[in-house]
Image: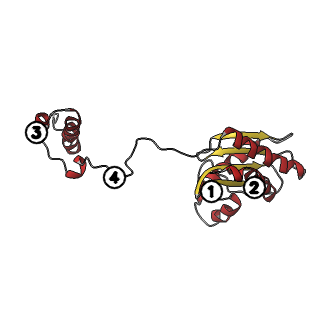
Amino acid sequence: MTISRRLPRALAITVPAVALLAATACGTGDDVAASSTTTEVSPVAMSTQKPADADQGTVTANRLSVATAGRAAQAALAKCQADGLGYVTVSVVDRFGNVQAMLRGDNAAEHTVEAARQKGYTAAAFGANTSDLAGRVKGDGPTIADLPGTLFLPGGVSVKVGNASIAGIGVGGAPDGNADQACAAAGLAEIAGSLR
């Protein structure tokens, strides 16, 4: 049995190209000249020009402060309580579904915790209120409702700065999703003036 000692073609091209790029970044001009005899790299790979908005390696994402998220949650729960629906859960999440503030009303059932988070995440991720998104899940076969961690029922509102969705407020537990939606909207109304 013979074992081939040849590298796969992708590695045979990639490894020398990476070595050339490393030598260009770290080595001397002589090193680059010596390395360039073993492989050719396209001008695109060697380009040192940076566009005006060059990649800085990190991005900045808007996020609600803890105080703002708390105010939104309190206002949403207060609206539900005023409507006789104090047994709901309110969840304020960031764009990625991470909970920033959560209030569980008196006697709120366990399932309302996850429902509120999922409604908030769905609104944040899609940049739209879940009451508006609910119509998109109809039809035969797979729909966006099949995406894990989402819930396309009324009760989630998107929090935006300009056109960018930065958070979501979700409410779960009322017997009617439109009541959940009204409470979430009250949470958004409370903080709308402080969003920039």
As measured in the structure, the alpha-carbon distance from the residue carrying label 2 to the one carrying label 4 is 41 Å
Q: Residue at x 66, y 54 (%)?
A: 158
Q: Secondary structure at mark 4?
A: loop
The amino acid sitting under disc 2 is Ala
Q: Under tag 1, what secondary structure?
A: helix
Decide: few, some or many residues near mark 1? Use Cα within 10 Å; few <14, some 14-19, many ≥20. some
Disc number for residue 33: 3
Q: Nearer the viewer, residue 105 or 75?
A: 75
Above or below, comparing residue 35 to residue 151 in the picture: above
Spot occupied by residue 17 in the image (x, y as percentages of width and height): 20, 42
Q: Quadrant of residue 13?
A: top left
Q: CA distance from mark 3 to mark 1?
A: 57 Å
Side of 42 where 154 appears, left or right: right
Q: Can you identify the residue that label 1 sits on?
A: 145
Mark 4–mark 1 Cα distance, whole angstroms, equals 39 Å
The residue mark sitting in front, 2 or 4, is 4
Label 3: state its secondary structure.
Answer: helix
Give the mark, 3 or 2, whose residue is nearer the N terminus: 3
What's under tag 1, amino acid-wise? Ala
Residue 185 disc label: 2
Is the residue under label 2 in contact with that under label 3 (CB below 8 Å)? no
Residue labelled with disc 4: 51
Mark 3 and 4 residues: CB-CB less than 8 Å, in contact?
A: no
